Image (cartoon, rainbow, N blue to C red):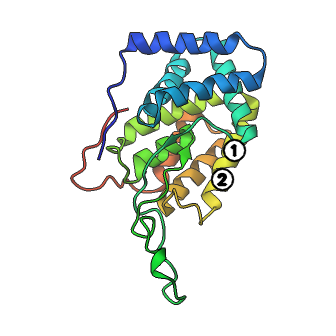
Amino acid sequence: MSDVPPIPSPTALRGAADRLVSALAAHADPEYRLTVLKRLARRLGEEQYPVFLRLLGVVAESDDVRAKRLLADTLATALRRMDLPGGALSSWGATRLPDTVTPFAASALTGQFFGATPRRLLGPVEYLTVWHLQRTQRTPLGAEVFRDALAGLIELLNHSDDARTLYPQKLAADAGNELEGAYTRATRERLAAVAAAWKAGESPQAVAQAALDAVPEQAPGGWVVRDL
């Protein structure tokens, strides 16, 4: 199981976040801004997607309301297009066994049958939730780190009216899709709790706590729980 590559220093992260905001601000076209954001995620690569999340966190933790609104509006554009900058996690045990009554061919015994689901791209909120709750190629996130990172991300997204409306709608749809192979039942319940609290106008901290309260802590026994 691989772990997260070292996170850059706080100084390096602040510099990178400042350059990202400057690049977004240099263009008035929302579609171009989304291209810039997606290009950054793509250049970092799947293994460095946590660095992308940390960059969002740096902006969220700042006092620059204009920067927060700019980044949130760009993510809202991605939500309208259903094209969020995403990262991949290999989720184990998220799929179901086939119907035991209906005959099936031996060719159905793929890696997915044995528990390895496709490495689909997950948006920032979904990625944090799966990383915390499910067995993946990464060491699981601790509950406090998950809650704080999620609250910061939601606070950032709330700077855009569209993002505040569209993201919980997306999460609710994902949670209601039992055929979604990337999520376990517990993960869907947690995403549903986030969506419901967010839609209800709860504070970012309350939304994040609702995610933790939706299902009991399930860190696999003997596993190390890491920081973001």
- Check contact, mark 1 vs mark 2: CB within 8 A: yes
The location of residue 75, given as percent across then percent down, is 67, 30
Q: Which mark is residue 172?
A: 2
Horizontal side, residue 203 vs residue 100: left or right: right
Spatial CA span between label 1 and label 2: 10 Å
The location of residue 187, given as percent across then percent down, is 50, 55
Q: In the image, what residue occupies the spot 76% across and 33% down?
A: 162
145 or 26, nearer to the observer: 26
Quarter assignment of residue 156:
top right
The location of residue 189, given as percent across then percent down, is 54, 58
Relative to 85, say whether 174 is above or below.
below
Q: In the image, what residue occupies the spot 55% across and 45% down?
A: 121
**Label 1 sits on what residue type?**
Lys
Density class for disc 1 (Cα within 10 Å; few <14, some 14-19, many ≥20) is some
Tag 2, which secondary structure?
helix
**Camera sees residue 85:** yes
Relative to 54, say whether 167 is above or below.
below
Which residue does the numbered mark 1 point to in the structure image? 199
* In this rendering, the label closer to the viewer, 1 or 2: 2
**Label 2 sits on what residue type?**
Ala
Q: In the image, what residue occupies the spot 63% across and 39% down?
A: 202
Tag 1, which secondary structure?
helix
Residue extending furthest toward the left: 222
The location of residue 125, given as percent across then percent down, is 55, 40
Quarter of the image with the C terminus in it: top left
Mark 1 or mark 2: whose residue is earlier in sequence: 2
134 or 4, nearer to the observer: 4
